[in-house]
Amino acid sequence: KEWLSKGHGEYREIPSERDFFQEVKESKNVVCHFYRDTTFRCQIMDKHLSVLAKKHIETKFLKLNAEKSPFLCERLRIKVIPTLALVKDGKTQDYVVGFTDLGNTDDFTTETLEWRLGCAGVINYR
């Protein structure tokens, strides 16, 4: 219940960089998708993250428009879109950059992404 009250269990967009810091502060595990509207692969990532957000309520799933967050992209050294920033205890621990870790293909499975997030310890994966 506490997780759900903090926005876990859904995949949602946050409006600004300032919101990113607030969201990350209040949850132990956060996956944040840095995306661009015009990038097809971001839509593929959205589809998988929507599924995982419902399944892994222990983790908060967010998306942030990279074009509207230049400070954060520079600070986190995000150069490839899509990039997932994997945040534990308020610190960015790992990144999923593009689809390289997911088999370098557009038709990777949700399970592949789930496994990758599990490797980073940002979701409970068995």
Image: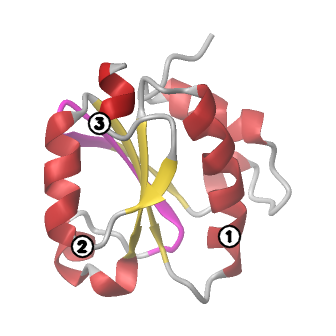
Q: Tell me what residue is drawn at x 75 percent, y 41 percent.
A: 110
Crowd rating for badge 1 (residues with CA inside 10 Å; few <14, some 14–19, many 20+): some
Q: Position of residue 81 (x, y in %)?
A: 51, 74
Does residue 99 belong to the magenta stretch?
Answer: no
From the image, tell me which residue sits under label 2. Answer: 16
Mark seen at residue 43: 1
From the image, tell me which residue sits under label 3. Answer: 6
- For label 1, the SS is helix
Q: Tell me what residue is drawn at x 46 percent, y 56 percent.
A: 12
- The image quarter containing residue 16 is bottom left
Q: Residue furthest right?
A: 107
Q: CA distance from mark 1 to mark 2?
A: 20 Å
Q: Position of residue 111 (x, y in %)?
A: 75, 33
- For label 3, the SS is loop
* Left or right, residue 102 beside residue 34: right
In which quadrant of the rendered image does the N terminus lie? top left
Q: Nearer the viewer, residue 25 or 93?
A: 25
Q: CA distance from mark 1 to mark 3?
A: 25 Å
Q: Position of residue 95 (x, y in %)?
A: 42, 50
Crowd rating for badge 3 (residues with CA inside 10 Å; few <14, some 14–19, many 20+): few
**Segment tinted magenta in the rendering:** 80-93
Question: Magenta stretch mostly in which secondary structure?
Answer: strand
- Give the mark nearer the N terminus: 2 vs 3: 3
In which quadrant of the rendered image does the C terminus lie? top right
- Is 82 placed above or below 32 here? below
* Left or right, residue 9 beside residue 16: right
* Left or right, residue 111 beside residue 101: right
- Give the mark nearer the N terminus: 1 vs 2: 2
